């Protein structure tokens, strides 16, 4: 449990919070792009032209 106590120190949190925020933002954008790609492929497989919408 010593590692957890050390993790909660203000100096560690000051570095950890921005890193987690940046990784979370890029992860969210990547998942959104992947979801849009899957939806586009599904429309193409159904015979719908996704560029006409």
Image (cartoon, rainbow, N blue to C red):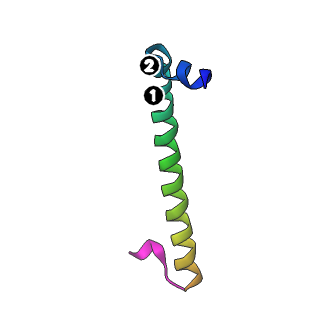
Would you call the spot at circle 2 few (<14 residues within 10 Å), some (14-19), or many (20 or more)? few
Q: Secondary structure at mark 2?
A: helix
Residue 27, which numbered label?
none
Which residue bears the numbered disc 2? 14
**Is residue 9 depicted above or below 17 in this figure?**
above
Q: Position of residue 33 (x, y in %)?
A: 51, 56
Residue farthest front in this picture: 1
Residue 1 lies left or right of residue 24; in this view the side is: right
Residue drawn at 45 percent across, 35 percent down: 21
Which residue lies at the image location 53% right of the left edge and 46% below the top edge? 27
Q: Secondary structure at mark 1?
A: helix
- Considering every residue shown, the one lying at the far bottom of the view is 47
Q: Which residue matches tag 1?
A: 17
Q: Is residue 20 above or below residue 30?
A: above
Q: Residue at x 53, y 21 (%)?
A: 5
Q: Quadrant of residue 1?
A: top right
Q: Give the quarter of the image for residue 10.
A: top left
Q: Are marks 2 and 1 in contact (CB under 8 Å)?
A: yes
Q: Residue 41, image x and y in percent?
A: 57, 73
Question: Which span is picked out in magenta?
Answer: 47-53
Which residue shows up at 52% across the image and 78% down it? 43
CA neighbours of label 1 inside 10 A, class few (<14), some (14 to 19), many (20+):
few
- Please state which of residues 11 and 35 is positioned toward the viewer in this rendering: 11
- Disc 2 to disc 1, C-alpha distance: 6 Å
Q: Position of residue 19 (x, y in %)?
A: 50, 28
Q: Is residue 14 magenta?
A: no
Disc tally is 2
């Amino acid at each position: 449990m010593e590692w957890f106590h050390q993790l909660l120190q203000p100096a560690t949190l000051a570095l950890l919070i921005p890193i987690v925020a940046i990784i979370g933002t890029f992860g969210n954008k990547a998942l959104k792009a992947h979801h849009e790609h899957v939806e586009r492929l599904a429309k193409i497989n159904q015979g719908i032209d996704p560029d006409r919408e």
